[in-house]
Amino acid sequence: MNQKIHPAILCGGSGTRLWPLSRRSHPKQLLSLLEPHTLLQATARRFADTARFAPPVALCGDDYRFIIGEQIRAAGLTPGAIILEPEGRNTGPAAAVASLWARRQDPDALVLLSPSDHVIGDLPAFHAALDRAAETARSSGSLVTFGIRPDKPETGYGYIEAGDPLPGGGAFAVRRFVEKPDAATARGYVDGGRYLWNSGLFLFRAADFLAELKRLEPAMLAACEAAVDKARIDLDFVRLDEESFAAAPSNSIDYAVMEKTERAVVIPVSMGWSDVGSWSALRDVADKDAAGNAIWGDVIAIDTKDSLVRSDGPLVVTFGLANVVVVATKDAVLVSSAEAAQDLKTVVSRLEDLEREETRAHPRVFRPWGWFETMDLGPGFKVKRLAVKPGQRLSLQSHRHRAEHWVVVSGKAEVTCDDRTMTLCANQSTYIPAGTTHRLGNSGDAELHIIEVQSGGYLGEDDIVRFDDIYGRS
């Protein structure tokens, strides 16, 4: 293959059906659900073949920019760009931006639009389907999607009905896209043989997609063109113009283009695919023990079968259970039947109505310099553990309402406190009074760990004034 494919990885989505592990501040694509890589890293690694692929481009929101860049690089790849969407506008505008960006690199670019949170178990089958799709897109100007051959009735997926075969074999015209069906309809789809699961993967020439978008959704294209033309570079990121991008109609690529165009083509494929949209779906693709259980963490399963049990915190013991989901984190525990776990969005909505913090953030919060974790909290005090990566440092900052005590557990800390700079090692400590300009950095070769004790009348994370920041947040 001479012409490279330009992968565009869509990094949005909250993954609420995988609560309590997936949360708004750290959604499922950033999690290691199937070791050793996160779903995002596993996605990026599919594009490691530099003979077949150009460097992947990631599209994401501002809150996830640092961790997405870090995870892709940790997977052994250098992203071609990390494009920041000022707000979520669905996959239609994302596809437009990806195509506009790829066309700048290559006027004849082939774009692969890929979700960041799917599992593909058979990589050779995936690459073979891409090769067939690339040839189809180049030769006929088709907009290709990939249909998964269903092995069971599934009410959680959309379907694609395949029409007439195209010359050359392996590809079919799309007769129609179908919304998620009820159980009886899904059974009929599987038995009929013409229906495929909608994978959410698309491949097309950028020029062909943009031409169809101009015909079908001209306002969307115009807004995205302005957002890309007015974009600015911020550190390692490309920031789309906020006002222009907000003007783009919020619509999926399916509704905006694929369901209306006559160029839609589907390639059926069996490649061990799952969107990992629920705990039951994760159980289906995970390794299981002799009793059919998928188990992670400190778990003892006694007389338990066909279940998913995971602990990222305390010891979890199950006894006399079947077909259940049990997930424990440090601050929440989910116990559900496997069937009910499909509807976990309802549970999360209820928790959000109750304004439970557990739907938004984990106890461990990731930052570009490392992470922090709240260990204890009470009236007038908060205890946190901080880990700072080698060579990194927090912003130069002050707090109006709180003082801080820092105790170094391991590593070497470089501490700035007003006009003084000091180096602290393990078992040494310092005090930062309220209103003091200060900064914490890691001047050593190993990760720095400190215990921070905050005291004061207000301990919110928004009590911060930044004066200087190497990550551009000041």
Image: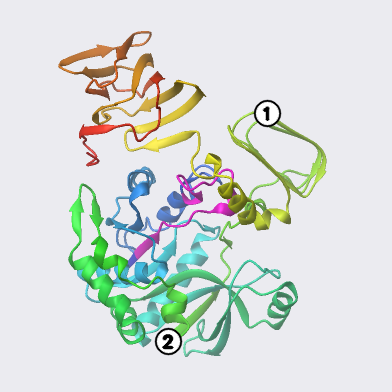
What residue do we see at 19% from left, 54% from top? 233
Q: Residue at x 51, y 44 (%)?
A: 32
Tell me where the magenta segment starts and ends, as one range.
7-29
Classify 351 as above or below 12.
above
Q: Earlier in the sequence, mark 2 or mark 1?
A: 2
On the rendered structure, is 292 left or right of 150? right
247 or 367, which lies in front? Answer: 247
Give the distance between the C-alpha atoms of the residues marked 2 and 1, in whole angstroms: 53 Å
Q: Indicate left or right for 371 with 154 as reference.
A: left
Colouring used for the render = rainbow
- The structure residue drawn at horizontal position 55% and vertical position 40%, both measured from the top left corner, is 358
Judging by the rendered image, the residue that carries numbered circle 1 is 315
Magenta region's main secondary structure?
Answer: loop
* Residue on which the image places disc 2: 261
Is the N terminus in the top left, top right, bottom left or bottom right quadrant?
bottom left
What's under tag 1, amino acid-wise? Leu
Residue 298 in picture, x, y percent from top left = 65, 31
Q: Is residue 140 or residue 226 the one in the foreground?
A: 226
Q: Residue 375 in the image: x percent, y percent?
A: 50, 24
In the rendered view, tell whether residue 346 sits above or below residue 312. Answer: below
Tag 2's secondary structure? loop
